[in-house]
Image (spheres, helix red, strand yellow):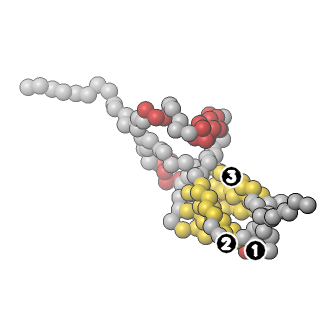
Amino acid sequence: MLNLKPNKIMSIIRYNANDFVPATFSSLIDKYFNESLVKSGGSSFVPKVDVIENDNQYEIHVAVPGVNKDDFKIDLHDNYLTISGERKISEEKKEKNFRSIETQYGSFTRSFSLPENVAAEKIDAKYNNGILELTIPKDEKKQLKKSIKVN
């Protein structure tokens, strides 16, 4: 009879060869700042963002799943739009025996410089399926393009 007894407890850890080689310069910067904050005891992350422009508005889509809509703070000051918030870790997760946690928790802040031709008083924000969607209408009276005639 063959008796096989494991002599070590095996941990399951995700391995990705690309973890050491960032795909873009932006991801290199994000990884540097996120890792240094975590190592120093802080917890923050940088959510991914899509910025879209069409004829009559701009849209900013921020990927922040698991955040309560009451935990967002959106400020506009001197044409700088700042979106901040926090994804809180729940107490019940501390009781579980996680082998790997890839979701990001902690606070985040993203800032955007808006052009002069936006209707700031009409900015709208919605949170749907983990995506914070900001709609920033353009103000037709404040056109950025202008033709200048040479005399």
Tag 2–tag 3 contact (CB < 8 Å): no
Tag 2–tag 1 contact (CB < 8 Å): yes
Discs 3/1, front: 1
Q: Earlier in the sequence, mark 2 or mark 3?
A: 2
Pointer 3 residue: 109
Q: Where does the image place residue 47, in percent across and percent down from the top left? A: 59, 51
Discs 2/3, front: 2
Residue shown at 80% from the left, 70% from the top = 142
Per the model, the C-alpha gap separating discs 2 and 1 is 8 Å
Lateral position of residue 144 relative to residue 6, left or right: right
Pointer 1 residue: 140
Q: Where does the image place residue 144, in percent across and percent down from the top left? A: 78, 64
Query: For the residue marked with disc 3, what is the amino acid?
Result: Thr
Structural crowding at the residue carrying mark 2, measured as other residues with C-alpha within 10 Å and reported as few (<14), some (14–19) or many (≥20): few
Q: Earlier in the sequence, mark 3 or mark 1?
A: 3
Q: Nearer the viewer, residue 32 or 67?
A: 32
For label 1, the SS is loop
For label 3, the SS is strand
Query: For the residue marked with disc 2, what is the amino acid?
Result: Asn
Checking the image for residue 118, the label placed there is none
Q: Nearer the viewer, residue 64 or 90?
A: 64
Quadrant of the rendered image containing residue 49: bottom right
Per the model, the C-alpha gap separating discs 2 and 3 is 26 Å
Pointer 2 residue: 56
The quadrant the C terminus occupies is: bottom right
